[in-house]
Image: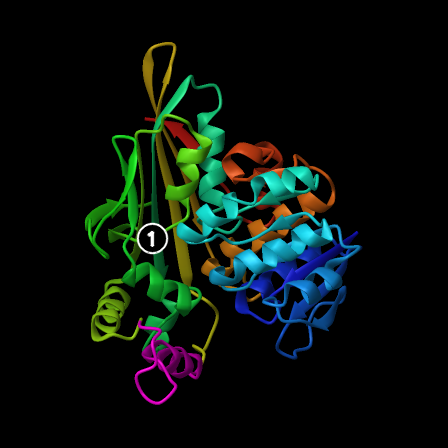
Amino acid sequence: MRLCVLGAAGAMAQVVLKDLETFAPEAEVTAADFRDFTPGTANARFARVDGRDEAATAKLRAGHDAVLNCVTYYWNLPVMRAALAARVPYTDLGGLYHGSLQQFELHEAFVAADVPALLGMGSTPGITNAMAGAMARGLDRVDEVHVRVGCLDRTATAAGGPLPIPYALDTVLDEFALEPYVVERGVAHPVAPRSGEEEIDLPAPVGRMRAIYTLHSEVAMFPRSFPGLRAASFKVAFVPSFMEKMRFLVELGFAEREAKVGSVSPRQMLLAVAAAQEAPAGEPADCDALRVDLVGEKDGRIVRRRGESVIRPHPEWGFGAGALDTGVPLSVAGLMLARGEVSTPGVHCPETTLPFERFFVELARRGITVTFEEL
């Protein structure tokens, strides 16, 4: 079995590589990136490639059994087209709504090539989509799906870090700056950035947090997967100090991509400064809580279901919860594609395509458990 991990020098890819080394040591892993680095896992070898070069990326992937895309979401399309050209099964971490809609346009081409593509296989989208799909089984209709996520990070608080970053800052900036989409009365429409503040009570140790709307892929995926869906939304909560800092930076203009000082944009400057922060000392002490509420109908009766997962750091691997619940699902999905457990040609969402029981069992083997209840 041969797997290609693209964007392999990034933080999320490190979890993917470690997971593949631990749970698929027999696999041959190509760790590809445009930056030079040495993979720290026994079954991975480095290959230099720029994912924006579709021809070179397609050539590199020839002969692999699956491509696991860890690059920043706005490069998903060329990476995905390269997988199509190489006729290699594909999966990624999500397209932040608009990117996902563009990726869906490749569905017929993937069907014609007899190749499966599984979008949004991180934490959220990813685990949250699998929850929604599992809860939708047996229902005559799905009316509403709402995702709520809480990210509690005591690591940076204890270490006094100026800007504790839960995942790719480039993505966080877009989530705070761009107009989120919600589905209401069956129609998707934008709302104001950082609007919809809501106090939510999540499982311990996350507890009560204030969440806001942000732009996310689930709201693009659920209407495609559940025809007739009337409502869908996504909200995320971070510790108050981080929320305040991100609001300030975005309102000050640091999410802007246009050059302001010479050839440098405010975003480029912020990303460079943030990347130079000293890493927090000690073991990770963060925790993620994922919740999906689904409303549907069965035999004329309204059904309300809830799925939840609480993710903690992996002390043996040394990864925090936010990295673990993003990288592990992508690794599991890549292995499923490579082994033919997900094989239907076309571009698919996790909630319609994953073998849910198998997926949740594999998550549990890595310390990530999911629970369900009727409300």
Left or right, 15 with reference to 23? left
Quick one: 10 or 318, which is closer to the camera? 10
Residue 261 falls inside the magenta stretch:
yes
Quadrant assignment for the C terminus = top left
Q: Residue at x 43, y 84 (%)?
A: 276
The x, y position of residue 360, in whole percent, is 56, 39
Q: Residue at x 45, y 28 (%)?
A: 135
Quick one: 294 or 241, which is closer to the camera? 294
The x, y position of residue 191, in whole percent, is 22, 49
Q: Secondary structure at mark 1?
A: loop
The x, y position of residue 161, in whole percent, is 35, 78
Outermost residue on the top side: it is 299
Left or right, 112 with reference to 265? right
Outermost residue on the bottom side: it is 262
Quick one: 113 or 357, which is closer to the camera? 113
Question: In the rendered image, which quarter is residue 356 located in?
Answer: top right
Q: Which residues are magenta?
A: 256-278
The x, y position of residue 27, in whole percent, is 77, 55
> How many discs mark residues in the rendered view?
1
Give the colour scheme of this rendering: rainbow
Residue that carries the numbered disc 1 in the rendered image: 215
Residue 120 falls inside the magenta stretch:
no
Quick one: 167 or 160, which is closer to the camera? 167
**Residue count near mark 1 (Cα–Cα under 10 Å), binned few <14, some 14–19, many ≥20:** many
Q: Residue at x 73, y 39 (%)?
A: 340
Left or right, 251 with reference to 163? left
**Is residue 164 in sight in this rendering?**
yes
Left or right, 237 with reference to 366? left
Q: Is residue 15 above or below residue 249?
A: above
Question: In the rendered image, which quarter is residue 294 located in?
Answer: top left
Q: Amino acid at mark 1?
A: Leu
